[in-house]
Amino acid sequence: MNEEISADNPYSRLVALKKLGVVKNFDEIRKYSVAVVGLGGIGSVAAEMLVRCGIGKLILFDCDTVELANMNRLFYKPEQRGKTKVQAAKETLEAINPDVLIQGRHMDITVVSNYDNFVQVLQSGSLDGHSAVDLVCSCVDNYNARITINMVCNELRLTWFESGVSEDALSGHVQLIVPGVFACYSCVPPLLVASGIDESTLKRDGVCAASLPTTMGLIAGLLVQNTLKYLLQFGQVSNYIGYSAWTDYFSTMTVKPNDSCPDANCLHWQKVVQMEQQNKKEQTSQDAVETAHSDMETKLHEDNEWSIEVVDNGFDTNQSQEMSSSLQDTSTT
C-alpha cells in the first residue's frame, strides 16, 4: 500500500490514519481475507466499504439475482437487472478497486449438497489459499442461512460477525461471535437478545419485509467499522451493538456462551477456551513468581552506600568443613 500522500494515490486518506497515530498498521489490511455472505442491503454496501478500504481478498456468497425491487437500496443499478448479485457485485467492486482479489460464489449455502463446498471455500480462503479466511461477515436475511453460517464457523473455529435489520426496517444489530468466547447464534439468537422474538417465527406469508437504505447503510457501516478494528487491532470491538431508528438509540452488551448450547462444536470450544484461560492464568502466576525471585536476587547484590560486596571466598563446601574440623582439633589440643 503506497504511503505517499498525493491526489493520485487512492490510499492517501487511509494511510493518513497511520500517520495520525489512529492505526499503527493500516497497510496490513492488504494481507487479510474476508468472506461476505449475503449481498443484500447490508452485504453489498459492506463489501464496497471493504474494497474501498483496500482489503486484500473478498469472497462473496449469494444465490439471488438483481431485481428492480432492489433499487431502493444502495449499490445496485437498474442496468444490472437479471444478473446474479455475485456477478453484478464483482463487476462493480473490481472497477472501484482493481487491487482487491475478489471471488464470487453464486450458491445457496442452506442446501445440504452445498454445505461441504461452503466449508471448503472458507477453509482455504486466505490470500495464499493455504488457510482459512480471517473473518466472515454474515449479512443474510433468513434464519436458515444464519444457522448454516453458525454451524460452519463453529466447526472451523472461525470468528464472524452476524448482522441484520428488523422486518420493519427501523432497527438492526451487529454481533461479534468468537467460538467458545462469546455466545454463538445457537446459544441465543441476536433478535431474541434485543426483543425477545424468535426469528425463526418471523416469516409471514404474503408479506415482504420493509427495507430502508438509511438503516441498511448504518448497520453496514457499524459492521465494517468493527471489522477494521478487529483485523487491525485498534479501538474497542463491541460484542453486540443494537440500533433503534425510533429513538436513535444505540445499545451495547456482552453475551456470554450458553453452556447448554445445542451446537456440539460450540460446547467443545467453550471447554477449549476455559482450558486456555486456565493455562494462561497459571503461566501468569509462574511468571510472577520467577520475576519476584529475579528481583530478590538483584536486591541482594545491588550496590550500597558502604560499598559492601558479597564475593566468592574461593573455598568449596568440603574444603570449608575440613578447615573447621582442623581448627576444632587444634583448639582441643
Image: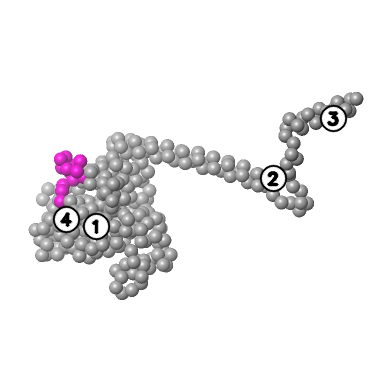
* Quadrant in the picture for residue 313: top right
* Quadrant in the picture for residue 46: bottom left
Kind of residue indicated by mark 4 = Val
Q: Name the residue under label 4.
A: 86
Q: Is residue 134 above or below residue 51?
A: above
What residue is shown at x 74% (from left), y 36% (from top)?
315
Structural crowding at the residue carrying mark 2, measured as other residues with C-alpha within 10 Å and reported as few (<14), some (14–19) or many (≥20): few
Q: Mark 3 points at which residue?
A: 327
Which quarter of the image is occupied by the N terminus?
Answer: bottom left
**Residues in magenta?**
106-118
The question of residue 214 being in magenta is answered with no
Structural crowding at the residue carrying mark 3, measured as other residues with C-alpha within 10 Å and reported as few (<14), some (14–19) or many (≥20): few
Earlier residue among tags 4 and 3? 4
Q: What separation in Å lies between label 4 and label 3 (alpha carbons)?
A: 96 Å
Point out residue 139 in the picture as x, y percentages from the top left corner.
23, 53
Earlier residue among tags 3 and 1? 1
Secondary structure beneath dot 1 equals strand
Q: What separation in Å lies between label 3 and label 1 (alpha carbons)?
A: 86 Å
Which quarter of the image is occupied by the C terminus?
Answer: top right
Point out residue 193 in the picture as x, y percentages from the top left corner.
31, 47
Instruction: Tell me whether the residue at label 4 lies in contact with that at label 2, contact meaning CB atoms closer than 8 angstroms.
Output: no
What residue is shown at x 36% (from left), y 54% (from top)?
230
Which residue, as the protein is rendered here, is positioned at the far left? 82
Structural crowding at the residue carrying mark 1, measured as other residues with C-alpha within 10 Å and reported as few (<14), some (14–19) or many (≥20): some
Point out residue 291 in the picture as x, y percentages from the top left corner.
58, 44
Kind of residue indicated by mark 3 = Leu
Q: Name the residue under label 1.
A: 101
What residue is shown at x 25% (from left), y 52% (from top)?
35
Earlier residue among tags 2 and 3? 2
Earlier residue among tags 4 and 2? 4
